[in-house]
Structure formats: C-alpha cells, structure tokens
Amino acid sequence: MSLKEKIIHESLKLFSLKGFLSTSIHDILEAANTSKGGFYNHFSSKEDLFYHVMEEANRIWREKNLSGLDEIENPIEKIIKLLENYRDRYLKDAENFPGGCIFITLSVELNDQRPKLSKEIDKGFIGTKNMLKRLLDQSKKQGELRKDVSTETVTEMLFAIMLGASVIYGTNKSTESLDKSINSVIGYLQELKP
C-alpha cells in the first residue's frame, strides 16, 4: 500500500469513527504514520482528502453491496441480495468502517456545517434510491409485484429502512437487531408479490 493509499484508508476509518470535522490532520498523520510533508505531498488540504476518501468509500460500497447481483435475473431477488450484502458484507465491515457507515456519519455531521461536502454524500443516496426504484419498476413490469404497489413508496421505505438499520447498528452493534431489521424488510418484499 502506497503512502497515499494508507492516508486514505486510515482517514476512512477515522471519519467513520469521529466524523470529518472532529478528525484533525494530526490524527490522520498519526494513524498513517507520516509527516505533514508526507500528507501535503499527496493532498492539498483536508477537504481534498475528503473527496479521495469518498471515492474509496464508494468503491468499497459497490464492491460489498453489489457483489453477486449480476448473476441474478429477477429484480426482486437482486434487491434481496443487495439487502443481504448490505447487512452481512457492508455494515458489519469493522475493518474499513469501525464506527459504522461513513455516509451516515458524515451526512449528519456535514449537512449544516459543510453543505458542499454533504451534497457529495447525497449523490450516493440518490444513486441508491434510483437503483432500487429501477429494480422495483422492472419487477412490476414483469408482473412480479402486485399492480397496486407504488414503487416510489416502496423505494422510499426500503431506503429509509437501510439508513435506519445502519444508524441503529452503529449505536448498538447488535447483529441480532440488524438481522431482524433487514430480514423484516426482505419478508415485506416477499409479501408484495402477486
């Protein structure tokens, strides 16, 4: 791992634990075992580092959550696999995200303090909702969802449950509670079939 990669990786963990605003450059230098010169040789500022950390966090999110989805034809089964991956591969990833989902941590922290940075996180939220809606629309078109199901409403509900499960798991680290939340929404999706 290069020094730049190490700084990004250690910052990812620190931002997950402490947030962006509470993580100092000194914290980052200490965690990455480098100097100010080592840091500024790769990043012009802490904000510049933020964008690199978001890139890495997005890469990990895709790797963890989208794993195996291409092998599934059925759109509802894709959503179920996404939810299972989110539960088992992403939220429980204490190596990369010891403080829980970095996107939740940073969106809450940065919304009022640094709206420009918060908008960067919101792009991922919008993308996730668009993906869920697209899969639900495909499923409805194929007759795998009841005709009375509002895909827009179900999309909002699924997204809210994903965020809620992340927040609850971030506070109590109870895998039992997390499993129950995600399993409940998977059961709900099954009930939407005709």
Image (spheres, helix red, strand yellow):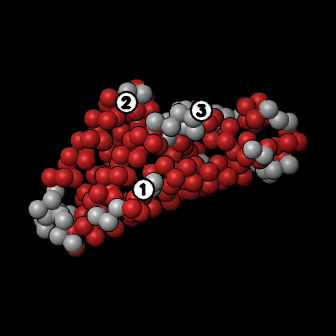
First-in-chain label (1 vs 3):
3
Name the residue at the front extreme.
71
Number of other residues with Cα within 10 Å of mark 3, as a class: few under 14, some 14 to 19, many 20 or more: some
Q: Which residue is mark 3?
A: 18
Q: Which residue is mark 1?
A: 68
**Seen in the image, is 9 located left or right of residue 91?**
right
Q: Position of residue 17 (x, y in %)?
A: 57, 32
The answer, for residue 117, to whether it is visible in the render is: no
**Of the residues shown, which amino acid type is indicated by label 2?**
Thr
Q: Which residue is mark 2?
A: 175
- Please tell me which residue is depicted at 45% across the width and 51% down the height of the picture: 65
- Please tell me which residue is depicted at 15% across the width and 52% down the height of the picture: 191
**Of the residues shown, which amino acid type is indicated by label 3?**
Lys
Q: Position of residue 121 (x, y in %)?
A: 53, 53
Number of other residues with Cα within 10 Å of mark 1, as a class: few under 14, some 14 to 19, many 20 or more: few
Q: Is residue 190 above or below residue 17?
A: below
Q: Is residue 126 above or below residue 54?
A: below
First-in-chain label (1 vs 2):
1
Q: Are marks 1 and 3 in contact (CB under 8 Å)?
A: no
First-in-chain label (2 vs 3):
3
Q: How far apart in space, not on screen, are marks 2 and 3 (Cα)? A: 22 Å
Quadrant that contains the N terminus: top right
Q: How far apart in space, not on screen, are marks 1 and 2 (Cα)? A: 22 Å
